[in-house]
Image (tube, coloured by chain):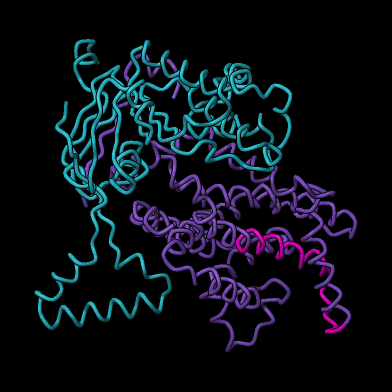
Amino acid sequence: MNPESTAAAEPVVHIRADRGNWDFHNLVRAPIQELVQFKELIRNTVVRDIKVRYKRSVLGIAWTIIAPLMQMIVMWTVFTKAFQVSMPNYALYLFSGIITWNLFSQSSVAGGASILGAAGLITKIKLPRVLFPLTAVINNLVNFSFAFAALLLLMVVTRAPFHWTMLSVPFMLLPLILFCMGWAMLVSALSVFFRDLQYILEIALGALFYATPIFWDPTALPAKWHWVASVNPLAKYVFMMKASIYHGVLPNFSTYAIATFTGLAMFVIGWIVFQRLQRKFIYWI
Amino acid sequence: MATSSLLTTPAVELKGVGVRYQLNLEKVFSLKELLVSKATRLGRQLRGREQQKTRRTADDFWAIRDISFSVPRGVCIGLTGRNGSGKSTTLKVISGVLHPTEGELWVRGRVSALIELGAGFNPDLTGRENIYFGASVSGLSRAETAKRIDRIVDFAELRDFIDMPVRNYSSGMYARLGFALATDVDPDLLIVDEVLSVGDAPFQQKCKDRMESFKKRNKTILFVSHDPQAIQDFCDTTIELKDGRINSPNP
């Protein structure tokens, strides 16, 4: 709100107890107007979360790079030494998968807990609640970009070839971001009502990790397991990312179209469920 | 908006507002319990509607009901009543945190609620960082906050501590910062819930002076307190709540 607007026309809030929250205004226009009005808060929430996370750590923001690198080194050691995997540039293959996976898994953990975590604000102050799961994803996107810088460094160190297809990474990210945001909205809203969800999610993420081509090669998958990669949306996102970074090819149009549609569908589902349930949060938090 | 309507329309208007807590729902906390409760409800519905009706009324609790009043601009109105009479619920509905189960309401102008001071403060951030964060919670931009920050710090008397994490603040310092911030966003409507008892005597006097200056500038104040003296000092008129309903006629 800027001073000019308050001088011209004061804000009038009209609240009516109705059940008509399926209409365009309640479901789309009003929440978006609120998000625009609170854009400063969105920015501050992202900045605050980053600041707070590393405030009392010695290495600070460097952890966003160190953690996935360590993850990669452990897996690289296990698979190249113990299991004799011999893929060229396997470190890059692993790392591009890990940082993509982390964007999703950390978004769903942080995003899923974001509403319960913001209980203090939500029960006291009127604000667009959807900003909490959304900023959790934006936050992990910031982490991803730091990790991506580490990836470039890794490519230089391991002398991996740079493919021009890497320029398509932002486009590969877009459907995944939509998917993560939708998923975060869905989980954060539902976990207000079912606290078990966070435990279920943890187990499901553990299983999903193995069903996603992070350390294994989908082309080497036996035919009877092909369905795993086709039903798991994460497999597509990771595959697309690896195609453009590691393999140096662009995914074909239908793969990209399906991935975009899946991301968009998840965003719409998450948004609608969230907007439908958010009025009831305060009774349950 | 025409000036005439600005003067005549009340700042706050409530019509038949009610908030219902569904106690039977609130007990459900796990998926298993939800499925069991849905199944029992379905069974009950199959057996007949009458039983279902009696169950609903037994488990529903109206925190407030049939609340209708309006607050003219520039008036300080006090909400009184015992614990659990619905004062805080009414304030939450007006501040937009709680969506009413029935009725409707209008709130005109920028609202600032002093419901719990420093609700959004993060203990690991400094006082200054928390001011920027807290101001954006009220919808202020960074530039607007930058213009106010010196005044806020001075009012809270925290000049020497403002770059220290608020984790190290005393509860009085915490509340002073919260009060200074919430009252500096220059609201048209100020909602005050039991918070004027913060700080020492000189600071309380400053709070009172600031409230007085709000009244002088024709701002509307909604005030909740258990202190009859404070209500008498500040408020032009009072509304008494009892068991979620208005006990005194709307003045």
Identify the residue at image location x=66%, y=83%. A221
Quadrant occupied by the N terminus of chain B:
top left
Query: Quick check: is A102 in the magenta stretch?
Result: yes
- Which chain is tinted cyan? B
Q: Position of residue A202 (x, y in %)?
A: 59, 72
Quadrant occupied by the C terminus of chain B:
top left
Dominant SS of magenta comes to: helix
Q: Is residue B116 left or right of A94 when viewed as pictured?
A: left
- Which chain is tinted purple? A
Q: Is residue A191 above or below residue B248?
A: below
Q: Position of residue A101 (x, y in %)?
A: 65, 64
Q: Nearer the viewer, residue A224 or A64?
A: A64
Identify the residue at image location x=25%, y=34%. A14
Q: Position of residue B106 (x, y in %)?
A: 24, 32
Q: Is residue A129 left or right of B93 when viewed as pictured?
A: right
What are the residue bounds of the magenta stretch? A82-105
